[in-house]
Image (cartoon, helix red, strand yellow):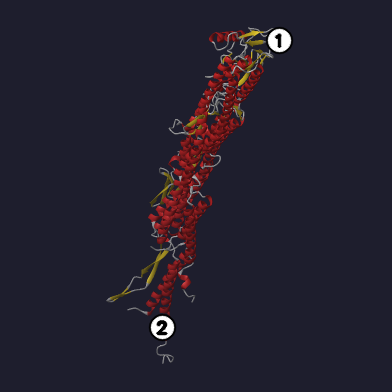
Amino acid sequence: MSSITSILSSATQSLLAETGALQVTSNNIANANTPGYSRQIPVFQEAAPTNDGNFSIGNGVVLEGYQSVRDELVTSQIQQETQSQSSANAQLNTLQQIQPTFTTSTQDIGTEISALFTSLSGLSTNATSSAERQSVLAAGNNLASAFNAASNVLTAQQTALNSPVTQDVSQINQLTQQIAALNPQIAELTATGQDGGSLQDQQNQLVLKLSTLTNVSTTQTAQGETLTTGNGTPLVVGSQSYALQTATGSDGMQHVLDQNGADITTAISSGDLGGMIQMRDTTIPGLLNQLDTLANQFGTAFNAAQAKGFDQNGVAGGNFFTLPATVAGSAGAISMAITSPTKIAASSDGTAGSNGNVANFSAVQTNVLAGGNTPGEAYANLVYQVGSLTSNANAESSATTASLLQLNDQLSSVSGVSVDQEAANLITFQTAYQAAARVISTMQAMFSVTMTMGTAAAE
Amino acid sequence: MRVVNMVPDMEYAVQQSQQTLSAALQQVSTGLRVNKPSDDPGASASMVISLASSANVDQYTSNVSAMQAQMQTADSALNSVITSLNTAVTVATAGSTGTSSAANDQALAAQAQGLLSNVIAQANTSYQGIYSFAGSASSSPPFVAASTTYTSQNGTAAAPLSTTTPLTAGSVTTIHDASTSEAFTFTAAAGDTIGDLASAISGAVTAGTLSLGTTATINAKGELAISTNSGTHGIVASSNDPVLGLVRPLWGTDVANAYAYVGNSTVNNVQIGDSATVATNVPGDQIFTAGANVIASLTGLITALQSGNSAIVTSSGAAVSAALTYVTQQRVPLDNTISQLNDQDSFLNQETLTLTTQQNALVGVNLATAATSLSQAELDNTAVLAAAAKVLPQTLLNYLSPG
């Protein structure tokens, strides 16, 4: 049979449990806007009942502890999506700086190619005109400059990506150290059946930051989270972190090496680092190669046309453009081989007034180059490619942003703090606390009555 | 689904709405749907090709304009030549009656001489420094008064040139013969001498390129003298060899009413469309010295009138008539070219319009649609902001009484 003291004990337990619940609620409200915070819930447990003869009677409530509400699957998806988003953003940033070079303007390559051919057409109306010849010379110079400028932009962007590679690797190393330091602490808690709580939240946040930098695979072990990057290069195993390094490769670029010095650059496939490496080592070299090929084939075809004619002095045409010995670097190095307007080989018979060779120059515009396209088409393809790459990176960035928003909403619906819900909890726990206090108050009154039984005051 | 925080969704919605608004605003302000390649890579690539076509069309239009002026100048010159030849026919008729006095014949001869001068002036017509009837040798007058002797600037009695004097390799010496209407060109090879030049001239005489009696000799002053026996026609000689210096007509050896054609037979072509070209010139030798030779017929008429022989005047008049017919025929292709240029001008204007329409379709924006999109984007943005302002401050705490 229950006693007043057991009721008081039960009420006191209840006060303590509700106070603990209120503390959890208070902590949730306090961290409502803390990034990465997972809401906690109090874990109430019925106290063991007391058997009294033929029946058992409850002994109130016990606050067993608290538990963070998490969704590991969604957390992992967010990490993956963050890697994709960071990669897309890194590529988009670089492409947005390259794109203006290939946007139609008064000085882009396409405009300058056209200007060269129209200036030659103008020359055909008066092959002896100094002004028309000067116009052709200027157009040739402008085209060479446009090729040079485009090549410089691409090369500068490629080189500029080296510094961020080193910075990213440095940040990765800092983060993996912090993650590794948390592993034993979390393992200790979970070994005793406790929730990782704020330590786990911190670690998740650090892994998310790491995901913005590189591709990361996460595996849960008894020692905590094991993290790898690239094709399985370990970053964190238990309390141990493995630092990545950078070194200048034979191509003059910064390469990423694992703790053993093995080159893992090509295995970094996402995150900011992966995006930059993709741009630096694949995308930009691809564009540069097309640009060099166009410059080289165009310059060679133009020189061949020039060689078929005679200049204003009746001398067989020499080179119009100067090109390097190899295709690589042609766009950056192409320049005018002639400086005098009289050297333009417009004549087909050696007389100054002949314009017969202009047709051979004009044919360069309509004849296909070795790649199977006319110069205009080849440049248009390049423009298409730059536009397409930028558009795709933009679409990828937007898609991953939308996807991340949805995933974060999903995670938030599980782990996020709802101030409304916490306000309701506050009332619930407060009411329960008040009720328990009322029980104690009632017990106190009952005690008073009991204690004063048979006294004058009682009579 | 448990919704705990609407701020990220609201931020995203506001951001999306503002991006749409910004894009709509840019389209309206620029009039362009595609401002950079990533806006529409395919359209941007097509635009590169289309703009190149536009640049070509603009240049073709410019070429047509230049050619129209050039061709019309040539046509006017031929028109003037035809007028002169018509007058010459009238003069010949007047001189062929047999009743004309000697003084009258001389007056008619003088009139015919004036007509010849006019024909030569027209044959040497130029437009902006280009001689219309010179072929590709268009930077100097194609018809030059002939002389019987040309001498070199270099060479003196004290230091005479000789047949063993070496010429400069690659130098060119040219003799235009007014009688044969042909040109002899000698390009000096390494080791060639003045003697080799003289031998080549002798060979050209044998071949009929140059008139009989044309020679290259060293005169008493030690100069190279290029001479001809053809006292009625003469030659025009030139050289760019610094060993000889300037080769000039010897004073007093000019041949009255004789002109040599120093142009060439090259026809220049100018592109006025992707697959359309026009000849920009009719070489003077084709119009004035080939076929019924215009200059020779007028020279013959002058000589006939001066002789007072009505029979010869009659036959000379017939030759002038034939020359008139010939020049009129030669004018037809020129007029056809002018007509073609006019037609092409209209076509190119239409082509410009077509390309502009194509480019507008590729990258331009329909202003009505763009304005509607902008209006819609503004409305959406206002709605999103209003929703955010309404929703975000709402929490349960607002409704709980403080007590």
Residue A342 is left or right of residue B352, and the answer is right
From the viewer's side, name the closer residue of A81 and B267: B267
Above-or-below relation of B303 to B385: above
The chain ID associated with circle 1 is: B
Residue B338: x, y in percent? 52, 32
From the viewer's side, name the closer residue of A18 and A319: A319
Residue at the location (53% across, 21% down)?
B322
Tell us which disc is closer to us: 1 or 2: 1
Q: Residue B283 appears in which quarter of the rendering?
A: top right
Residue B13: x, y in percent? 46, 58
Above-or-below relation of A428 to B122: below
Residue A453: x, y in percent? 40, 88
- Residue A253 in view here: no
Q: Determine contact: label 1, label 2, CB under 8 Å.
A: no
- Neighbor class of circle 2 (other Cα within 10 Å; few <14, some 14-19, many 20+) is some
For residue B338, which numbered disc appears in the image?
Answer: none
For residue B156, which numbered disc appears in the image?
Answer: 1
Which residue position holds label 2? Answer: A447
From the viewer's side, name the closer residue of A296 and A19: A296
Q: Could you say whether the residue bearing mark 1 is in a helix, strand or loop?
A: loop
Residue A274: x, y in percent? 46, 44
Q: Could you say whether the residue bearing mark 2 is in a helix, strand or loop?
A: helix
Above-or-below relation of A138 to A70: above
Residue farthest toward the left in the current orientation of the protein: A54
**Could you tell me the amino acid type at mark 2?**
Phe
**Could you tell me the amino acid type at mark 1?**
Thr
